Amino acid sequence: MPPQARLMQMITGYWVTQIVHALASLKIADHLDDGFLTAEELAALTGSDADAMFRLLRTAASLELVSYDDSDIKGGGRFGSTPLLEMLREGVPGSLRDIAIVHGSPAHWLSWGKFPDTVRAGEPQTQAALGSDVWAHFAAHPEEFERFSNSMTELTDGLSREIASLLDMSGVETAVDVGGANGALLHALLKSNEDVRGVVLDLPNVETSALAEAEKAGLSDRCEFVGGSFFDPLPHGDLFLLKAVLHNWDDDSCVRILTRCREALRPGGRVVVVEMPLGPIGEPGFAPLLDLNMLAVVPGRERDLAHYGELFEAAGLRLSTVVPTRSPQSLIEAVAL
Ligand SMILES: C[S@@+](CC[C@H](N)C(=O)[O-])C[C@H]1O[C@@H](n2cnc3c(N)ncnc32)[C@H](O)[C@@H]1O
């Protein structure tokens, strides 16, 4: 592809973000689950303008997000699902519906809108974009926060079974999922380790959805929710999980969180950080992009393994093992010094 065409694709990338966001918000995948529908039918089902819906679907068809059947052209042609659209259906394995909505919603969308200022300042411009930091924004917008927590569950669900199969659980009685949101990772661990008890520690506003998810997983008797902050003393355990938590924070905050984990660690226990380590500069991959998402939205960053080692050491821990997964995420394990 010529450089100008490639660049043009990058420049207009956010149009596609919002097209996918609209398809997900309007539940087009769910509506097309039973078969083909016309744009008018989809407009009626979603309370949308018929012409705008047709234009959205025509563009979505050019992106392979929907298919088009014009064999009954008198009826105006009908639109159907595709493998891509199927991943925007609610509740299917691997669904990315909530994450598609989250990335077009205020916390992410408005914060990224200030990105040049973010680079100038070296920190997220959420105060200017949202009126507060992202966690206060979520506290004031519970529906957006619930969507965000569910999107974390979507992303974690796919990986959690693999993580559960990779983690050595011998000697573990209590696992604590620190900043565990709805507890998707912990639930996978508890399901494959029937003698283990679990604690999800997250902000109090996650409690309702976390308890509902534990009940749905049939784990209410072994999985407790503790509402609180990971900057305060933590419940004791022999395995501390930190998945997609440290990358939300600056180094000093990470050391404080890891220190809390080390203080609550029973003898012989360990901390398992699940993150996407940065590779060498120029290596293609998702981690460098995610790093900028962490710069734009939270005061966080992606790190390479040496950097995680330094954080552990500052918190009185030692990096012991790194276990790669099939995804770009690795299990970065640490034990007390
Ligand atoms: C990116 S999410 C990761 C969720 C989960 N570990 C996963 O990977 O699916 C970060 C989590 O940290 C939680 N969080 C933010 N600040 C916190 C704090 N001070 N104490 C405890 N949890 C916090 C958020 O509510 C959110 O659930």
Image (cartoon, rainbow, N blue to C red):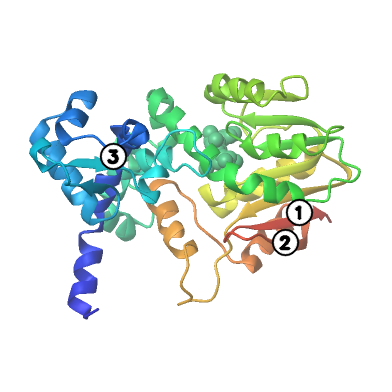
Residue beneath label 3, please? 23
- Do the CB atoms of the residues marked 1 and 2 lie less than 8 Å apart? yes
Mark 2 to mark 3 CA distance (whole Å): 37 Å
Mark 1 to mark 3 CA distance (whole Å): 36 Å
Instruction: Give the quarter of the image for residue 278.
Output: bottom right
In the image, is residue 166 above or below residue 100?
below
Q: Quadrant of ligand 1?
A: top right
Residue 15 appearing in the image: no
At 37% from the left and 43% from the top, the residue drawn is 100
Residue 176 appearing in the image: yes
Q: The disc labelled 2 sits on which kind of residue?
A: Val
Seen from the viewer's position, the closer of residues 40 and 315 is 40
Residue 168, x across and y down, in percent: 83, 51
Whether ligand 1 has any atom under 8 Å from the Cβ at mark 2 is answered as no
Mark 3, other Cα within 10 Å: few <14 / some 14–19 / many ≥20: many
Residue 332, x across and y down, in percent: 70, 58
Residue 214 located left or right of residue 71: right
Q: The disc labelled 1 sits on which kind of residue?
A: Leu
Residue beneath label 1, please? 166
Circle number at residue 323: 2
